[in-house]
Image (cartoon, helix red, strand yellow):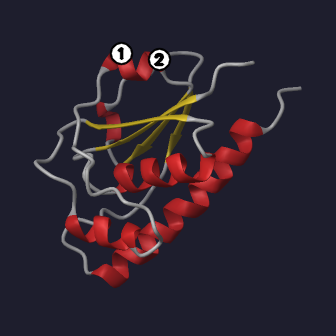
Amino acid sequence: MPEKPVVLFVCIHNAGRSQMAAGYMRELSGGAVEVRSGGSEPGDSINPVAVAAMAEVGIDISQAVPQLMTTEQVKESDAVITMGCGDVCPIFPGKRYEDWELADPKGKPLEDVRAIRDDIKARVERLLGELRAPVV
């Protein structure tokens, strides 16, 4: 049985976008993908509005803790998805990199964060489909 792919979601504070993406990937992959998330400058806690937005769709990210993204995590990941961390993320040849341009939910009202959440879900579904596609 092949190893499951490892996906790393990165944003600056690891408190909103990357945590929502990680929550969706864990849920939608049913454990078929190893999910990690980190930040270049981790915040103190998860954005409570992001937690509320995800709770609305039945995904609990309330226990997540912002983590520092490490070079080792990047090396060990099959796909690295950045969300607004600019040039801070290390790049290694042969890795799949995507930069998702998403608004930062920090300080935004729930209705705005819902739109970001739904955008993230669509992107995670696409990525998951590509990860599961057979390599030809």
What residue sits 60% from the left and 53% below the top? Answer: 28
Secondary element at image label 1: helix
Specify the quadrant that holds the N terminus. top right
CA separation in Å, label 2 and label 1? 6 Å
Is residue 44 found left or right of 55 in the rendered image?
A: left
Name which residue type carries label 2.
Glu
Q: Residues within 10 Å of mark 2 (few under 14, many from 20)?
A: some
| Image position, residue 43 (x, y; %) | 14, 47
Q: Nearer the viewer, residue 34 or 14?
A: 34
| Image position, residue 104 (x, y; %) | 30, 62
Q: Quadrant of residue 33?
A: top right
Identify residue for label 2: 76
Is residue 111 found left or right of 129 in the rendered image?
A: left
Identify residue for label 1: 72
Pick out the residue farthest to the right. 136
| Image position, residue 65 (x, y; %) | 22, 44
Assess whether mark 1 and mark 2 are in contact (beta carbons under 8 angstroms).
yes
Secondary element at image label 2: helix
Q: Nearer the viewer, residue 58 or 95?
A: 58
What residue sits 55% from the left and 62% below the top? Answer: 121
